Amino acid sequence: MSSADASAIERPELAVVLREVFGISETGIRICVFLMEDGESTARELADHLELDRSTVSRQLNHLTDIGLLEKQ
């Protein structure tokens, strides 16, 4: 097995880790990925970009903050 193959085995997909370890929903995963790629964003900007209701985004952001994956600024 090459080192690249071993590395792939040792690094599970981000979505799998977020779902299985942290219990994050698909919506929460979409938010996390967006924030990692684009940086800081408001709930309104996230809702617009991800085509989600702002209240849904706010709930997800609160959950992600509560479990320590995000910090509010």
Image (tube, rainbow, N blue to C red):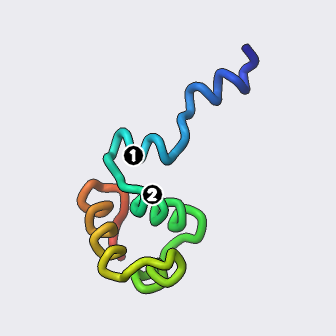
Question: Do the numbered discs 1 and 2 sit on residues whose CB atoms are within 8 Å?
Answer: yes
Q: Position of residue 57 (x, y in %)?
A: 36, 74
In the figure, residue 3 lies in which quadrant? top right
**Quadrant holding the C terminus:** bottom left
- Position of residue 64 in the picture relative to residue 14 (left or right): left
**Residue that label 2 marks:** 29
Q: Residue at x 51, y 75 (%)?
A: 50
**Residue that label 1 marks:** 19
Q: Position of residue 71 (x, y in %)?
A: 34, 66
Of pointers 1 and 2, the one earlier in the residue sequence? 1
Q: Residue at x 41, y 63 (%)?
A: 27
Q: Residues within 10 Å of mark 1 (few under 14, many from 20)?
A: some
Name the amino acid, label 1: Arg
Q: Residue at x 49, y 84 (%)?
A: 48
Name the amino acid, label 2: Ile
- Position of residue 48 in the picture relative to residue 7 (left or right): left
SS assignment at label 1: helix
- In this rendering, is residue 24 above or below 62? above
